[in-house]
Image (tube, rainbow, N blue to C red):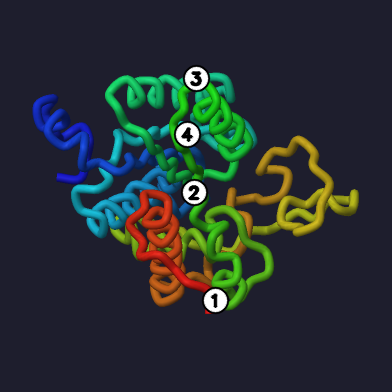
Amino acid sequence: MIYWHDLTWEEIKERLREIKAVLLPIGSCEQHGPHLPLGTDTYSVIILSERLAENLKGKVYILPPIWYGISPHHMKFPGTITISPQTLANFVFDIASSLKYHGIQKLVIINGHGGNIPTLTDVLRRIRDELGIEVALVNPWILIGDIIQKVLETDIWGHACEFETSTALVEIPDKIRIDKIRKPTLKIPSVRHIAVWEKNRVITPWNTDEFTDTGSIGDPTKASREKGEILFNAMLERTLEFIKDFIGETEERHES
């Protein structure tokens, strides 16, 4: 068993000394174009967390996932559910408080949704300073920027795109509407430096429908399972490297 919620209280009590950290997958319930399900972000971090826990058998356990995120920018597309930053921050902090009470010292948040990053970054500080828990936020795609640059054919990517569709072909192939995959019409802003796909940009409040007609930011028609395998395995490898270091399971490295 790799899930916290599959254990009994007696089993948790017996294993507390062996548990090095717990993983908290957080995603979203938001539109992902006409071809990917609303739960794409959450599915992605659940599957990644499962692979991590399987590799670290008995040393880490997966908490019940949080299926909702901060997604007001997707609300123009039916089905999206968004929560406030305060709700997410308080929810995560309360979970961490319970973990502290039971003696857990390390928490790793595995996040699948970019809109959650500012709030989760803020709550890390509260968890550390007020609870004394060692905590980290992993945004898996950020760990593999160099791999993404090598693998993707398209320069514009970010949502329900070549990247997410490729990884979904590995993670949730049975949930993809293959016949619905199509290239979006991207709307180029009249003001320079505010397009969400620009690397160097001015930050403005934005809604997804202002940039795309399908909800995809990037071209999902360029996706493939082969690309997805490379991208998913890279996220797994680098996240695993980090967690091993974080929980002290890596052999001491010596500089040459």
Residue 132: which disc? none
In the image, what residue type sits under mark 2?
Val
Distance of mark 4 from mark 3, alpha carbons? Answer: 24 Å
Q: Secondary structure at mark 3?
A: helix
Q: Earlier in the sequence, mark 2 or mark 4?
A: 4
| Residue 205 higher or lower than 240, as above or below | above
| Residue 169 higher or lower than 91, as above or below | below
Q: Secondary structure at mark 2?
A: strand
Is 200 left or right of 14, judged from the image as shown?
right
Q: Residue at x 59, y 48 (%)?
A: 215
Where is the N terminus found, in terms of image quarters?
top left
Residue at the disc numbered 1: 151
Residue at the disc numbered 3: 90
| Residue 222 higher or lower than 43, as above or below | below
Residue 84 in the image: x percent, y percent? 57, 22
Q: Residue at x 29, y 57 (%)?
A: 51
Disc 3 packing (10 Å; few <14; some 14–19; many ≥20)? few
In the image, what residue type sits under mark 4?
Gly
Distance of mark 1 from mark 2, alpha carbons? Answer: 21 Å
Residue at the disc numbered 4: 79
Distance of mark 1 from mark 4, alpha carbons? Answer: 31 Å
